[in-house]
Image (cartoon, helix red, strand yellow):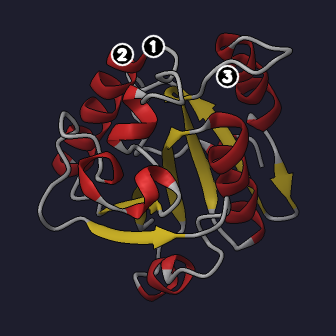
């Protein structure tokens, strides 16, 4: 089964925050977890795709770039987006299909927006998804802490399905590049 690691909006200004925004919850652990899964992807010869949001840091400068502490390999493919949905208006879906990808492992920011949307869109687009449960983050809202938002989405998206394809949530220390979807079908 062909796979890809999809890292969404792991941008410096989003992770570290800025004058108007707080840093994401548990940012140092998030960076370590993303790097751990990148290393696993490289060892398994799984291609890495990064998506950047053009709204972050007005689409320019260091704040717009993938966080400098994240070890993105040179050969990673990068897409820029203008919507919450990483698949909307980008070449992401076409790219994944051209590579005959069947399983995507998803990480990044922000849990309740771009991560949730990517997981759901990927399943309806014909991919099985593994969401790295300790590999996505967000900031608190007016009604929920960031930790509550993350826990809620991990529970909600584990087993989320769209007919033939669905998502499972696994933590980074698991073998996320050994899909377990067939165990549930």
Which residue is pictured at 53% across the width and 80% down the height?
90
According to the picture, the residue beneath numbered tag 3 turns out to be 150
According to the picture, the residue beneath numbered tag 2 turns out to be 29
Kindly state the secondary structure of the residue where label 3 is placed: helix
Which residue is pictured at 45% across the width and 28% down the height?
19
- Asked whether 8 or 134 is in front, the reply is 8
Image: 125 above or below 39: below
Q: Earlier in the sequence, mark 3 or mark 1?
A: 1
**Residue 61 falls left or right of residue 11:** left
Q: Provide residue 33's location: percent of width, then percent of height.
A: 34, 26
The answer to whether mark 1 and mark 2 are in CB contact below 8 A is yes
- Asked whether 129 or 91 is in front, the reply is 91
According to the picture, the residue beneath numbered tag 1 turns out to be 26
Q: Residue furthest left?
A: 74
- Visible residue check, residue 132: yes
Kindly state the secondary structure of the residue where label 1 is placed: loop
Labelled disc at residue 101: none
Q: Give the class, few, some or many, for how many residues have Cα within 10 Å of label 2's Cα (few <14, many ≥20).
A: some
Which residue is pictured at 11% across the width and 63% down the height?
74
Q: Provide residue 8's location: percent of width, then percent of height.
A: 48, 51
Q: How many marks?
A: 3
Q: Earlier in the sequence, mark 2 or mark 3?
A: 2
- Asked whether 147 or 95 is in front, the reply is 147
Image: 180 above or below 36: below
Which residue is pictured at 76% across the width and 37% down the height?
157
Kindly state the secondary structure of the residue where label 2 is placed: helix
Structural distance between the alpha carbons of marks 3 and 1: 11 Å
- Visible residue check, residue 7: no
Res 126 → quadrant: bottom right
Q: Provide residue 13's location: percent of width, then percent of height.
A: 38, 39
The answer to whether mark 3 and mark 1 are in CB contact below 8 A is no
Query: Which numbered mark, 3 or 1, is in the foreground of this view?
Result: 1
């Amino acid at each position: 089964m062909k796979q890809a690691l999809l890292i969404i909006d792991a941008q410096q200004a989003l992770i570290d925050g800025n004058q108007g925004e707080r840093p994401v919850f548990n940012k140092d652990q998030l960076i370590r977890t993303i790097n751990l899964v990148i290393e696993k992807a490289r060892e398994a010869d799984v291609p890495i795709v990064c998506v950047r949001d053009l709204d972050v840091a007005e689409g320019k400068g260091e704040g717009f770039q993938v966080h400098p502490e994240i070890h993105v390999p040179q050969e990673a493919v990068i897409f820029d987006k203008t919507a919450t949905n990483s698949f909307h208006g980008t070449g992401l879906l076409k790219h994944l299909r051209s590579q005959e990808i069947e399983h995507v492992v998803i990480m990044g920011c922000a849990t309740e927006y771009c991560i949730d949307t990517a997981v759901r869109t990927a399943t309806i687009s014909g991919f099985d998804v593994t969401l790295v449960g300790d590999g996505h983050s967000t900031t608190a809202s007016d009604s929920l802490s960031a930790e509550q938002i993350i826990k809620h989405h991990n529970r909600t998206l584990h087993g989320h399905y769209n007919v033939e394809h669905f998502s499972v949530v696994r933590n980074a220390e698991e073998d996320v590049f050994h899909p377990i979807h067939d165990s549930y079908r």
